[in-house]
Amino acid sequence: MPVGNPRTTRAGEDSALPSETAGQLAVYREALRLAERDVALDVAVWFHAGQSHRAAGRVESAVACFKKVIELAPDDAFAYWDLVDLYLKQGAPPAAVMVLSTLGERLAESQQWAGAIAAWTRASELTPDDADVLAALHDAYIKAGRSQEASKVQSVLKTLKPPAPPPPAK
C-alpha cells in the first residue's frame, strides 16, 4: 500500500504493525515519561523494526513500520528511501513512484531542492513518461536555479503524447 497522506494511527492499531514492538515502545515511553510530541524514540524503534522485518522477509510488517516512521517524521527522507527500495524489490514500481512523489513534494515545500530533485529524478527513471513527475522535476530544477537541466526535462515533456480527450457527452 503506497504512502499518500498517511493517516494518523496509534502504535499497534494497524494490523500490519508488529504488536510486540508497539507494546515494548509503550513501556519504554512510560518509563522514560516521554511527552506525546517527543517521537525520536518511536522513530528509531519503528525504523529498526522495519529493517529487521525486511531482513526477515516479513514485507507487510516492514512496509507498515516504514510508513509509521514517515507518519511520525514526515520531513525525514530516510524511511521514504527504504520504503521505495522495498517496493522495488517487491516489483511494485507504481507504489515506489507514489512514495518518491510524496517525498519530492515534502522536500519542495521546505525548499530542499536537491532532495526534491533526487526524489523526482528517481521517480522519472521508473516512469519516464509520467508528465506529472516530469513537470514536478522541471519546476524543482527551475526553483533550484538549474535552468539547463530544466530545459532538458521540458524537451522530454514536449515529446510526450497529450492525454486522449474525454469522450463526448451524450
Image: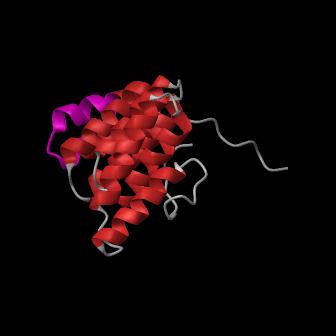
Q: Is residue 59 magenta?
A: no
> Magenta region, mostly helix, strand or loop?
helix
| Of 65 and 140, the residue lying toward us | 65
Q: Which residues are magenta?
A: 141-155
Picture coordinates of residue 123, whole percent (x, y):
39, 33
Q: Is residue 56 left or right of residue 29?
A: right
The quarter of the rendered structure image containing the N terminus is top right
| Of 143 and 95, the residue lying toward us | 95
Q: Is residue 142 left or right of residue 135?
A: left
Q: Using the rendered image of the protein, determine whether residue 85 is visible from the camera's viewpoint.
A: yes
> Which residue corresponds to the image point at 36% horizontal and 36% vertical from the top-left?
82
> Which residue corresponds to the image point at 40% horizontal and 30% vertical from the top-left?
85
Q: Is residue 112 left or right of residue 9?
A: left
Picture coordinates of residue 12, whole percent (x, y):
54, 58
Using the rendered view, name the quadrant where residue 81 is placed. top left
Residue with the most extreme right position: 170
Picture coordinates of residue 32, whole percent (x, y):
28, 69
Residue with the most extreme left position: 145
> Which residue corresponds to the image point at 28% horizontal and 51% vertical from the top-left?
76
Q: Using the rendered image of the protein, determine whether residue 73 is visible from the camera's viewpoint.
A: no
